[in-house]
Image: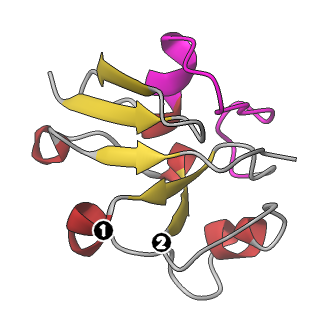
Amino acid sequence: MPKITYIEHNGTAHEIDVPVGKTVMQGAVDNNVPGIDADCGGECACATCHVYIDAAWLDRIGLPATGSNEASMLSFAAVTQPDSRLSCQIDVTAALNGLVVRMPEGQH
């Protein structure tokens, strides 16, 4: 099972085993990781699962496609950066073992 490290804005890290087939957001919600609100339940409709992808992973994860629902939703996120993604749109695969994501200070 891939391990994903979720880092809160205050620096607290949570290393979680997330089953293949779930999303990065589901891994956080299922394990009560603070900082991922997921108000819409993973429907790409709220931007409250916004994360920053660790630089070492950005090439593998990629950015949302221009004009996609995810890119549109990110425009509603509080503080986006070039490495911003919605964690509900990142499917967990074995290749994501070791992924590190950081949460913004707030989701609203």
Q: Which residue is mark 2?
A: 83
**Total number of numbered discs in the rendering:** 2
Q: Quadrant of the N terminus?
A: top left
Relative to residue 108, is residue 59 depicted above or below? below
Horizontal arrangement in the rendering, residue 108 relative to residue 57 (left or right): right
- Label placed on residue 55: 1
Residue plotted at (84% across, 66% down): 76
Relative to residue 49, is residue 15 depicted above or below? above
Residue kind at label 2, given as amino acid type? Asp
Contact check, label 2 and label 1, Cβ < 8 Å: yes
Indicate the secondary structure of the residue bearing disc 2: loop
Q: Is residue 23 visible?
A: no
Residue plotted at (71% across, 33% down): 38
- The picture places residue 88, in percent across and down from the top left corner, at 55, 44
Instruction: Name which quarter of the figure residue 7 lies in.
Output: top left
51 and 46: which is toward the camera: 51
Query: How far separated are the C-alphas under marks 2 and 1?
Result: 8 Å
Relative to residue 23, is residue 16 depicted above or below? above
Q: Residue furthest top?
A: 31
Instruction: Name which quarter of the figure residue 8 lies in.
Output: top right
Magenta stretch bounds: 26-44
- The picture places residue 69, in percent across and down from the top left corner, at 68, 69
- The picture places residue 42, in percent across and down from the top left corner, at 64, 38
Query: Which is nearer the N-term, disc 2 or disc 1?
Result: 1
Residue kind at label 1, given as amino acid type? Ala
What color scheme is it? Answer: secondary structure
Residue plotted at (78% across, 36% down): 40
Instruction: Name which quarter of the figure residue 99 lies in.
Output: top left
- The picture places residue 100, in percent across and down from the top left corner, at 31, 45
By secondary structure, the bulk of the magenta-drawn segment is best described as loop
